[in-house]
Every structure is written in C-alpha cells, then in structure tokens.
Amino acid sequence: MYKIEMNNITKKFGTLIANDNINLKVKDREIHAILGENGAGKSTLMSILFGLYQPDKGEIKIDGKKVIINNPNDANNYNIGMVHQHFKLVENFSVLENVILGVENVGKLNKIDYSSPRKEISKIVSEYKLNLNLDSKISDLTVGQQQRVEILKMLYRNSDILIFDEPTAVLTPQEIIELMKIMKNFTKEGKTIILITHKLNEIKEVADRTTVLRRGKQVGVLDVKNVSTQEMAELMVGRKINFNIDKNTTKKGNVVLEVKNLTLKKKNIDIVKKVSFSLKEGEILGVAGIDGNGQTECVYGLTGISKISDGKVILNSIDITNSSIRERYNLGMSHIPEDRQKYGVVLDFDLKSNLVLQEYYTSKFQNKQFLKFNEIKSYSDDLIEKFDIRSERGSNTFVRSMSGGNQQKAIVAREMSRKHNCLVAVQPTRGLDVGAIEYIHKRLLEERENKKGILLFSLELDEIFKLSDRILVMYEGEIVGEFNPTETSKEELGLYMSGAKKGNYNENI
C-alpha cells in the first residue's frame, strides 16, 4: 500500500493543461523526487496535494483511503506540510508569529499564548540547527533565513508528509548537505518526503525514486540508484544536455565598475564594511559567501536599492554613488535581483509589460507619452521565443500565474537584452531546470565575450567555479580573499566562507 496516491490528476488553467492525467504513487517513508523543466507542472501537482488548487479530474488517497483536500487546513489535518518555493510569510510579523500563525493557542481574555510555543519552537531551532532569532521580523531576514522559517513552520505542525518545493535554491553547499541529512533523518523518524528540485545531484544523493514530468505529462518513474544524472536530464528535457562549459580566454578591457570602501549600515551596525573591487570589460567576477554575510546589502548599495553609508560606486568613470536606479540603468547597468518577486517583476502586470519595465519610457516604446503597443508586443514575443519563456497566454499572461522558473527567465531575458555593459547577476539560475541553466550560462559567457563586465553573486559554488575569471569571498560584510578558480578548490573557499581562514585582501584600484 502506498502512503500517497494521486490518480489521473488533471488541472487546467484556461487553455493551458498544467497536469495531464498524472499518476503519482509515493511509498511510506521514502524520499520521492518530482523532476521536470520549468513549467512542467511540478508545483501545480503539489499545490493540489496541499489544497491550494482543486483538480479538474482525478482523486487523492492517503494510506489507501480517498480524501478531499479543499484547502491547506485540510492538508494539515492529514499531516501534510509544504515548504513553498515562494514563501508564504507575513513580512511585518516576527519569526515566532509566522510559525504559529493559524495554529495559535488563545487563552483567557482572547490573548495569544506565546510562551509555550516559544519553548517548543526554540527546541526545534536548536535540534535542527536552523539558526533563527524568533523575534526577528521577516522583512529583516535574508532569503535563505526566510526559507528556514518555512521549514520551521512545517516541523512545528508535526507533519508526517513533507513537501519541499525547490528547498535548496538559496542555500549554500554546507547548508544543502545539512538539509540532506535532515531529510534522511526525517524518513528514519517515519516521515514521507516529496522533493521538487531541478538539481540532479541532489536527487542522486537523497531520493529513492523520481517521477519525471515534461510539459504537464508524466514521462517516467525511475529508481534513482539505477539511473545517471545524464539520463534523468535527457528524460526531463527530451534532448541531450551538455554539463561542461567551454570558456574561452578573453582579453580584459577597461574598468566598467569601481567600488571604493563601500559601507552600508543596518540599525547602526556595519553590514558591509569597506568593500573595494574593480570589474573589467570581458570579465566575470564571482562573489561567493554563505548567505547572510553582506552580499544582499552589497548588491542593494551597488544597484541603488539602498543608500550607502560611506564609499563610492563608479560606473563607466561616472560617480553613481547617489544616483537613482533609473540613472544607473541609463548609464549601462543591468540587474538580475536575488528576490525576483520583490524586485524583479510586477506580478499583476502582464508579461510584455514586465519585459519592457526598464525601457517603456524611451523612444523605442513611446511616442509623445503614448506607448507603442505593437512594438512592445513584437519585442516581447521575440524575447519569449529566444529565452523559451512558457506561459498560458504568451505576452498577455499575467506574471503572477507563471511558474517561478519562467518568471526568472523573463527577468534574465529583459536584463540581458537591453543596452548595458555592466551586469549585476544575483542567483541568475535560481529555480531553473538544467536545460535553462545550460542556456543562461552560455548567454553569460556570450556577454563576457562581447566585452560586458559581469558581477556574479551566487550561492552555487559549481556556478561560481564554472563561470568566474576571479572569485571574491565575503564573510561578515568584508572581502576576505581573492582567488583564481583554476588554482583553488571548493574546500579552500569553504574555509574562507565560514571564517575559519581569512586573507589580507586589498584591492588597489
């Protein structure tokens, strides 16, 4: 008998068939991976299991009994928990308030009891090494820390069936290893796990079986130990994937970005401390570090999202320290943000509007303050085809209804296609499948060969090593070392990332 059965599940959104007669069967105490391209229907299928969507056809069984799951509360009643790819958190609530939201204990005078759950939650935080301050506001946490809050919510509710939707997309290698251990321990404790991920190595590491989806259809169920990552990738995308990157030697040109003693404060504490570096034409400069060590704040200072406390930022020999975001864009900067839904797209705009967000006011798309809708649609249709952005209604699709991976493709398409010579790319392949990652990596290398300067912030060490000409490591807001990727190792970088080693980095600009 299976722990979970989803039989003949079909779900449509307008004319788009997100799930087409899918049969998912998950054994008790196994880790079952759901593998597929962006937009293949993985998150939709799990949203049905969690009660966020209702299937148009099909049935769900838990422990052999047919169940009706109308909403997440019903899912919780069946001990189903889910860590969402896009977090379901209230930003102005604390960690503690978010964890108990919906399952509060209300005492006398209708007051919420915080003391009892605080003790229980603190124990979980300590046991699973989640490293969270329960009184911190969600708005003050990094993306990685917010994900830990989602995991904590699920653990607090004693879920037996755990759904992880792209759980390692924002984690460091060390954190990923720790999460894999936690997952394996969960199954030993009697829990059943469904893992949605694009990372084939993680499936090989932790999953027992995998169900593969392609364009809404189920194309295979595999015993993970009997297949290679290459075979899984080919079944997922329907073609051969080249995992190796051919990176040609390029001649470095002029300095496009100079950063001098960049300092940012947060609540009167230096989060970024006198960071200095230079970026040249035809160069990819990778920045590695454990999440929460000042990378996010550094990017905010460089791109104009936050005001810097001290130091200078110079773009193409022009001081942009106090320039607006639009002024920076007009001077040649593009930005792929870490948080795509907060800073990358307008969820309630359609796709074509999002694809011209940085240029709609230019003569290319506007005449005497009237938008040139035909030009906008033609331009967006071209990008949709080039970058394989999948959605229900093409350029007229509201971005909120698109998968996270396709939202990311839209941002990458917009930022790479507009006129620029400096690209600040933060987690550019976050949430993308192997086929899309292969394509984005090729585009980044094309940018490099076309004399663009690329500042790459990534938590994926494989990505940093594959693409970078130089690597900087940030720890506690400082740059603690510069490395040549051909002359160092991930283990060496890990020591600097964790603070176990610290170099005497000094950038002379």
Image: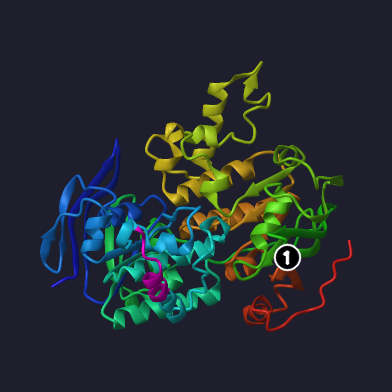
Which residue of the protein is positioned furthest toward the right in this rendering? 508
User: Image height check: is 457 above or below 257?
Assistant: below
x and y percentages locating residue 221 in the rendered image:
27, 66
x and y percentages locating residue 293 in the rendered image:
65, 68
Q: Nearer the viewer, residue 40 or 143?
A: 143
Residue 5, quarter of the rendered image: bottom left
Q: Nearer the viewer, residue 60 or 476?
A: 476
Q: Is residue 1 visible?
A: yes
Answer left or right for 220 relative to 419.
left
State the residue at coordinates (25%, 53%).
51
Which residue of the protein is positioned furthest toward the left in this rendering? 65
Q: Main secondary structure of the magenta part?
A: helix
Answer left or right for 70 relative to 252.
left
Q: Is residue 147 magenta?
A: no
Count neighbours of disc 1 (C-alpha within 10 A) and say few if under 14, some if 14 to 19, many if 20 or more: some
User: Image height check: is 451 above or below 4?
Assistant: above
User: Image height check: is 478 above or below 502?
Assistant: above
State the residue at coordinates (58%, 58%).
140
x and y percentages locating residue 417 in the rendered image:
63, 41
- Colour basis: rainbow
Q: Nearer the viewer, residue 49 or 105?
A: 105
State the residue at coordinates (40%, 70%).
115
Which residue matches tag 1? 469
What residue type is disc 1 on? Asp
Q: Which residues are magenta?
A: 111-121
Q: Is residue 205 visible?
A: no
Q: Is residue 114 magenta?
A: yes
Q: Does dot 1 land on a helix, a strand or a loop?
A: loop
Looking at the rendered image, the quarter that the C terminus falls into is: bottom right
